[in-house]
Amino acid sequence: MAARKGRALSSLEVTLAVLFVAMTTVSIVLIATRATDTCPGPPPGRAPPFLVGVGRADCTGPPAELPLMGYANPQQTAAGIHTRLFSRAFIVDDGRRRVVFVSVDVGMISQRLRLEVLNALRAKYGDLYRRDNVALSGTHTHSGPGGYFQYTLFMISSKGYLESSIRPLVKGIVKSIDVAHGSLRPGRIYKNRGRLGASGVNRSPHSYRNNPRQERDRYDRDVDQDMLLLKFTDADGDGIGALSWFAVHAVSMKTSNRLVSADNMGYAAYLMENHKDPSALPGQAAFVAAFSSSNLGDVSPNVRGPRCVNSGLACDYLNSSCPEGGTKECQAFGPGEDMFDSTRIIGLNIFRKARELYADATEEVTGSVQSAHQWVDMTDVVVRLDDAREVATCKPALGHSFAAGTTDGGGDLNFTQGAVEGDPFWDGIRDALLGPPSNQTRECHRPKPILFSTGEMKWPLPWHPEIIDVQILTLGSVAVVAVPGEITTMAGRRLREAVRRELGSEGAFSDADVTIAGLSNVYTHYITTYEEYQVQRYEGASTIYGPHTLGAYVQKFAGLARAIAQDRVGSLPPGPEPPFFQKNLFDLLGAAKADRKPDNGTFGEVLRQVLPVYRQGDVASVTFVAGNPRHSGDVRDRSFVAVEMRDDASDAWTLVHTDASWETRFLWLKDRNRRSNATVEWHIPIDAAVGAYRIRHFGHFKSMKGLRPVITPYQGTSDVFRVTAGFYRR
Ligand SMILES: *[C@@H]1O[C@H](CO)[C@@H](O)[C@H](O)[C@H]1NC(C)=O
Ligand SMILES: *[C@@H]1O[C@H](CO)[C@@H](O)[C@H](O)[C@H]1NC(C)=O
Ligand SMILES: *[C@@H]1O[C@H](CO)[C@@H](O)[C@H](O)[C@H]1NC(C)=O
Ligand SMILES: *[C@@H]1O[C@H](CO)[C@@H](O)[C@H](O)[C@H]1NC(C)=O
Ligand SMILES: *[C@@H]1O[C@H](CO)[C@@H](O)[C@H](O)[C@H]1NC(C)=O
């Protein structure tokens, strides 16, 4: 096929070329004529208003021994994978300015994580991606590894600052931005809104009802059921991504869960990406769908509500405790048979609403892109009340009811929600161990009885952040308010309203769609209204900067909104830079020890074999001699699991599921002698193709050559088994 060089074109070729050009021109004219005749389409000649880019990257950390971040339960350490965790990035550029929104499958963004991501972005992109135009938001899954915090309280609850945990998060987030950056192209954004019921209930109705009557009367529910969705397309109108916000806690997976999981919001993303790109393996679709958290502070996915597990009776309404067994016995339940089923149902509800909103999204987002950001010392914000009185925020502190936990996951000790008086027993222990709170802090937080005066605890590092981020991104008339914590339903409504009012003040944003992106940028626990704070349920007790926390946020975010409306974000002072601690970070987890195996066994060997035949709908299971998954290092973009199907004609094996698949569970168990097992379950879908399959497991084990650790990869493969036609069981 080598080209003959230097040959003159024959007259025949020239004629053909001219004919070709002529015919192409004619067809273009014909197509154009037909198009304008029958299909309105986008206004002729109007170029796409934005450059848009979408990207996704695996950010799964070590799925073993690390505490899962969310329930603050030290026994809840990772022991395998249900679904993988991903970071999903969206970049929008209006030709003048650029914004980046990233939704990450983590409990919350920590200040440390954000600062490390910003440092990595600066090293790579200089001034392009900055504190003001990059917003990071966590989906609030409670089943991701912890250990990515620099404040002492969070380090204690997640066994320290763990390099092995924060590294994959930083790399995964940055990679998702890299992919989005690399995919920037002319494109359009459409928005749509709708309501989704039966997927969230208020778990502190007693607090909610303490809000003023006339305010509550403006709403027909005690939770927000709105979903806002943005549809991203390229210039041809082909969909490339969807970004949505919905307010519900990602706690369908309970404190008893030990598997890394993206929970209900992650499952919605999984379904949407699979729906748009059915042939891709999980996490590999070209289409990127993010389901971002919102004002979920008091919203539980456990929609059957709480009851006393021991007696079956209702829990106490005011303090969510049970006559026998107290707080621990009062637990809320999801709609499903078990937590996996509840996760599936809530995730499916969210996905279906998003799919519908996506299909009907026709209102185009146009205009400019803006971002405003400030750091704020949250311990000392003066808040002007409506009656012109001046009050202030406090140094951080947690109340007694913080230790009670919630009906989604209660504390182990005898704390109950709604405590407005301290318990002499626990106060005594606290005073002996940590010292008493100062009178000033006690006064400031009233009526909260202080359990931990974290703002006065500095050893070995401050226990809570003092400097926090406030940030708003706008895309045309859509405003994304990045809130650094879990804001309750009514608090979120007040904040959105204040932002909408300020954005509208100059006429540029007459009808802004304001949404809250929760768990963004730095974690500060909860934000309730002043009235909700008074009854000191868990959310009020966890509003760490005192009763006027929301008032301070409303003021600060309104300031950002005004600056955007007046097009003067450049003149906003950046505020005090947060600390980046180099010393006194601690790691209580340590390196994983060398693995042992059964005397006559080998790593990867099958201990419990699959059955020869399963029906569709059954669970295939195989157990291998395993190493500690922490020895596999950076596990992003890999899999501990493969379910493969044999093509009977060619004898070749095709990968059908990885450990990112909803259908697989990778369960890791270690005994006291450091011997461990990996069990792989395949929950065979009722529509799985009939045929021959095998299950494989990949891992690494550590051994010692004298004093030198050696990491060795291993793999194991089950016997071949058949899947036959089943019967429909549901
Ligand atoms: C919870 O409140 C009820 C009254 O509603 C009270 O009888 C009970 O003692 C409280 N429980 C605790 C542990 O405070
Ligand atoms: C909690 O338990 C301690 C020790 O048993 C006891 O002294 C204290 O009164 C209990 N507190 C409540 C509120 O029941
Ligand atoms: C704090 O308040 C208590 C009780 O009101 C008082 O006895 C004590 O002297 C105060 N401490 C300081 C340091 O002012
Ligand atoms: C190891 O040896 C024991 C007894 O010596 C035997 O029962 C067992 O099946 C062996 N296990 C494997 C995996 O070969
Ligand atoms: C691993 O599996 C074997 C065989 O089923 C079992 O005897 C052993 O107790 C398991 N070990 C762990 C740590 O689960």
Image: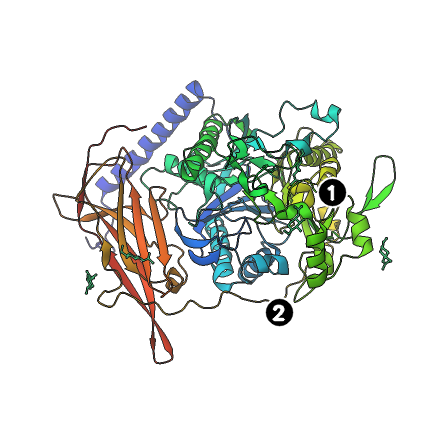
SS at mark 1? loop
The number of numbered discs placed on residues in the rendered structure image is: 2
The vertical placement of 357 against 113, above or below, is above
SS at mark 2? loop
Pick the residue in front: 464 or 648: 464
**Residue in view at x 11 percent, y 43 percent:** 649
**Residue in view at x 60 percent, y 47 percent:** 520
Left or right, 616 with respect to 164, comes to: left
Instruction: Identify residue for label 2.
Output: 584
Pick the residue in front: 271 or 223: 223
Residue 619, position as x, y percentages in the image: 28, 41
Residue 375, position as x, y percentages in the image: 70, 53
How busy is the neighbourhood of tag 2: few (under 14 within 10 Å), some, or many (20 plus)? few
Q: Distance between the Cα atoms at labels 1 and 2?
A: 35 Å
Q: Amino acid at mark 2?
A: Asn
Q: Amino acid at mark 1?
A: Val
Is the distance from the Cβ of mark 2 to the nearest ligand 3 atom less than 8 Å?
no
How busy is the neighbourhood of tag 1: few (under 14 within 10 Å), some, or many (20 plus)? some
Q: In the image, which disc is placed on residue 420?
A: 1
Pick the residue in front: 620 or 482: 620
Camera sees residue 58:
yes
Residue 293, position as x, y percentages in the image: 56, 40
Left or right, 55 with respect to 639, comes to: right
